[in-house]
Image (tube, rainbow, N blue to C red):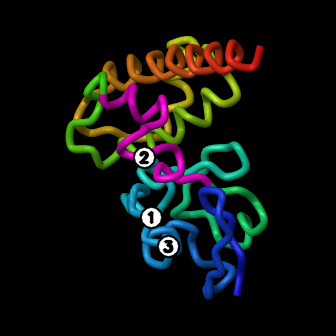
C-alpha cells in the first residue's frame, strides 16, 4: 500500500512500486485527463506535474512520486472556475482533436510556475517533448502567452486585495 498526494489529497493505492503513475491516475483514481499515447515517454500526452516539474507519467514508477505532490489537469481548475492555463487554451481554441492538450497544458503550467513571462523560444523549448499531430502549435503558443497574462493579472489583483 502506498500513499500518493494527488491534487492536494492523499490517496491510498494498492499497487506495485514499479507501476507507472499514469495507470494509477487513470485506473484507480479516475483522473483521465492524462492520456496513454505511446507508453514510452515520447509523446507527452501523459504529462503531469510532480513536485513542480513536468513528468511523463507513463514511464514514472510510483516509487519515485511517493511523498511528492502530484498535480493533474483536474487539479488546476474546474469547469466553473478554470485555471488561467485552462481558460487561455479555451479562449485561443488551442485544441483540435484534444488528445495532446492536457499534456501541453501541464507542461506549460510547469513552465509558467518557474518563469511567469517566457519568450516564444522558451515556450517552444519547453513544449518540444509533447507531440501534436493536428498542427495547432501557433494557437498553443498564443494560449501560453495568454495564460501568462491571466496569471499576472490574477497575481496583481491578489496583491491589491492584500493591501
Instruction: Determine whether 117 is above or below 100 in the image.
Output: above
- Residue at the image position 50 percent from the left and 68 percent from the top: 25
Answer yes or no: do the residues labelled 3 and 1 have beta carbons within 8 Å? yes
Alpha carbon of mark 2 to alpha carbon of mark 3: how far?
17 Å
Q: Quadrant of the N terminus?
A: bottom right
Q: Nearer the viewer, mark 2 or mark 3?
A: 2
- Classify mark 3: residues with Cα within 10 Å, few (<14), some (14-19) or many (20+): some
| Label 3 sits on residue | 29
| Label 2 sits on residue | 78
Which stretch is magenta? Answer: 71-90
Q: Quadrant of the C terminus?
A: top right
151 relative position to 34: left or right: right
Q: Position of residue 41 (x, y in %)?
A: 51, 55
Alpha carbon of mark 3 to alpha carbon of mark 1: how far?
5 Å
Rendered image quadrant of residue 91: top left
- Residue at the image position 62 percent from the left and 82 percent from the top: 13
- Classify mark 1: residues with Cα within 10 Å, few (<14), some (14-19) or many (20+): some
35 relative position to 50: left or right: left
Amino acid at each position: 500500500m502506498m500513499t500518493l498526494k494527488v491534487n492536494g489529497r492523499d490517496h491510498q493505492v494498492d499497487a506495485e512500486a514499479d507501476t507507472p503513475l499514469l495507470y494509477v491516475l487513470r485506473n484507480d483514481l479516475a483522473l483521465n485527463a492524462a492520456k496513454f499515447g505511446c507508453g514510452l515517454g515520447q509523446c507527452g500526452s501523459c504529462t503531469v506535474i510532480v513536485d513542480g516539474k513536468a513528468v511523463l507519467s507513463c514511464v514514472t514508477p510510483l516509487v519515485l512520486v511517493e511523498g511528492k505532490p502530484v498535480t493533474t489537469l483536474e487539479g488546476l481548475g474546474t469547469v466553473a472556475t478554470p485555471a488561467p492555463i485552462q481558460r487561455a487554451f479555451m479562449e485561443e481554441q488551442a485544441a483540435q482533436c484534444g488528445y495532446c492538450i492536457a499534456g501541453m497544458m501541464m507542461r506549460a503550467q510547469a513552465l509558467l510556475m518557474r518563469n511567469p513571462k517566457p519568450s516564444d523560444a522558451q515556450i517552444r523549448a519547453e513544449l518540444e517533448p509533447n507531440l501534436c499531430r493536428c498542427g495547432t502549435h501557433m494557437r498553443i503558443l498564443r494560449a501560453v502567452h495568454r495564460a501568462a497574462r491571466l496569471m499576472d493579472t490574477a497575481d496583481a489583483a491578489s496583491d491589491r486585495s492584500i493591501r
